[in-house]
Image (spheres, rainbow, N blue to C red):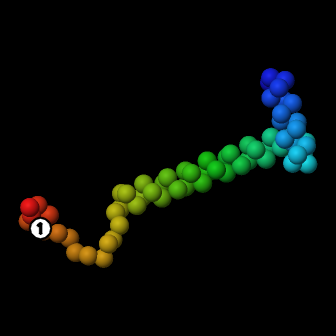
Amino acid sequence: MDDSILSRARHAAVDAHKSVSGWVKDLVARELDARDLYEQNRKGALLILKEGLSLGGRRLTREEAHDR
């Protein structure tokens, strides 16, 4: 790892009152949690797209849908 990056990481860890390894562990855990949440939300959105949303109305007839 580049010395300047390691130095910045040390300062960030000190600011967070943690060791560098503890700070990195928390950083990785947050990133993985964010990815899990993203994947969960993505699956939910895809399910909604697949099933559609009920808007409480009736289906249009072909004539109504294509009425100009």
Query: In the displayed structure, does residue 10 sit left or right of residue 46?
Result: right
| Residue 35: x %, y % from top left | 61, 47
Residue 61 falls in which quadrant of the image? bottom left
The amino acid type found where label 1 is placed reads: Glu
Q: On screen, 15 above or below 37?
A: above
Query: In the displayed structure, does residue 36 sit left or right of residue 26?
Result: left
What is the secondary structure assignment of the residue under circle 1?
helix
Residue density around tag 1, few if under 14, some if 14–19, many if 20 or more, within 10 Å: few
* Residue drawn at x 26%, y 76% as measured from the top left: 57
Residue 21 seen in the current view: no
Query: In the displayed structure, does residue 44 sit left or right of residue 5?
Result: left
Q: Which image quarter holds the N terminus?
A: top right
Residue 8 falls in which quadrant of the image? top right
| Residue 52: x %, y % from top left | 34, 63
Q: On screen, 53 above or below 18?
A: below
User: For mark 1, what is the residue?
Assistant: 64
* Residue drawn at x 11%, y 67% as measured from the top left: 64
Q: Which image quarter holds the C terminus?
A: bottom left
Counting the numbered discs, the total is 1
Farthest residue, direction top: 2
| Residue 5: x %, y % from top left | 80, 29
Which residue is at the front of the view, 46 or 3? 3
* Residue drawn at x 68%, y 45% as measured from the top left: 31
| Residue 7: x %, y % from top left | 87, 30
Residue 2 seen in the current view: yes
Residue 50 falls in which quadrant of the image? bottom left
